[in-house]
Amino acid sequence: MILPRTLEAEFWQEFKQYEQERRMSYITTGERIGYERGEQEGRQKQAQTLVLRLLQKRFGELPQTAREQVQSLSTNQLESLGEALLDFAKLDDLINWLAENPANSN
């Protein structure tokens, strides 16, 4: 099919723009590692926020030491605590869990 010159020029311009929009940019190893760390830190911060909100909803204002201990937990530990807190009846249950699962033990 042969297009009129004006349409052919418009087609090639749009085609060029389409290719540029779809082209993948190169990401260096350092950028990729930084991106992955940022994602991990974001997930950990979200888990901390959620667990602290749930604990506060259940027990009211938490002691500062308990809050700090929760904030120092790994993402895996925060997920475990999130499940465990469903069975907590009193603040002592949280304190005992934190004593049994110190930060950086996973």
Image: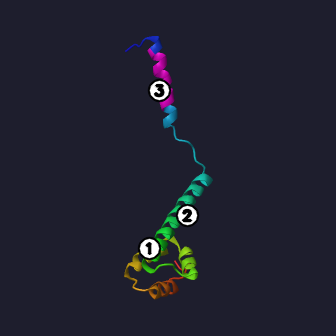
Give the structural element (helix, strand or loop) at label 2: helix
Q: Nearer the viewer, mark 1 or mark 3?
A: 1
Q: Position of residue 29 (x, y in %)?
A: 60, 53
Say above or below: 66 vs 40. below
Above or below, comparing residue 5 to residue 23 in the picture: above
Residue 104 seen in the current view: no
Q: Amino acid at mark 2?
A: Glu
Res 54 label = 1
Q: Give the residue number, with chain letter if any, for mark 3.
A: 15
Question: How far is mark 1 from mark 3, CA to CA?
Answer: 52 Å
Residue beneath disc 2: 41
Q: Position of residue 13 (x, y in %)?
A: 50, 23
- The amino acid type of the residue labelled 3 equals Phe
Q: Position of residue 81 (x, y in %)?
A: 45, 77
Mark 1: secondary structure: helix
- The x and y percentages for residue 102 are 54, 82
Give the class, few, some or many, for how many residues have Cα within 10 Å of label 1's Cα (few <14, many ≥20).
some
Q: Which residues are magenta?
A: 7-18
3 or 70: nearer the viewer: 70
Tag 2 or tag 1, which sits nearer the N-term?
A: 2
How many labels, in total? 3
| Quarter where residue 26 is shown | top right
**In percent of the image, x 56 and y 79: which residue is there?**
69
Mark 1: which amino acid? Leu
- Give the main secondary structure, helix, strand or loop, of the magenta stretch: helix
Closer to the chain start, of discs 2 and 3, is 3
Near-viewer residue (86 or 17): 86
Of tags 2 and 3, the one toward the viewer is: 2
Q: Is residue 105 a member of the stretch shown in magenta?
A: no
Q: Label 3, secondary structure: give it.
A: helix
Proximity of marks 1 and 2: CB atoms separated by less than 8 Å? no
Q: Earlier in the sequence, mark 1 or mark 3?
A: 3
